[in-house]
Image (cartoon, rainbow, N blue to C red):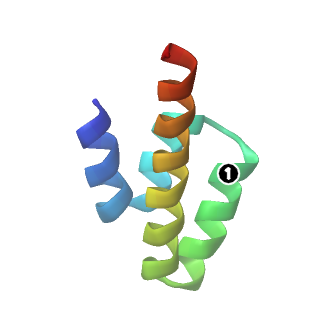
Amino acid sequence: MKILRFVLAILLPPVGVFLTYGLSTTLLINVLLTLLGWVPGIIHAVWALSKYEEKVTAIDQ
């Protein structure tokens, strides 16, 4: 599932963020960045997903 989220973060940034965070301010920020340009949306989505994975890994340890 993690790989699918990152692929979606590159192809459709808001979808990847939505699958991870649901309806949240992170999704709103990503939608706005994607509307400003596809590349800023991708950068934010990949960053948000990596931070989420980092937090989940820290909790598991």
Nearest the viewer among 58 and 15 is 58
In the rendered image, the quadrant that contains the N terminus is: top left
Q: Residues within 10 Å of mark 1 (few under 14, many from 20)?
A: some
Nearest the viewer among 22 and 51 is 51
Locate residue 5 relative to residue 29 in the image: left or right.
Answer: left
Q: Quadrant of residue 11?
A: bottom left
The residue under label 1 is which amino acid type? Answer: Thr
Locate residue 54 relative to residue 33 in the image: left or right.
Answer: left
Residue at horizontal 69%, vertical 62%?
A: 29
Residue at horizontal 49%, vertical 16%?
A: 61
The residue most toward the front is 61
Locate residue 27 relative to residue 40 in the image: left or right.
Answer: right
Residue at horizontal 49%, vertical 15%?
A: 60
Look at the picture and state if 23 lies above or below 45: above
Q: Which residue is mark 1?
A: 26
Residue 7 in the image, given as x and y percentages of width and height: 26, 52
Look at the picture and state if 37 lies above or below 28: below
Q: Quadrant of residue 9?
A: bottom left
The residue most toward the bottom is 37
Look at the picture and state if 3 lies above or below 59: below
Residue 13 in the image, given as x and y percentages of width and height: 43, 60
Q: Dot 1 lies on which element? A: helix
Residue 58 in the image, given as x and y percentages of width and height: 54, 26
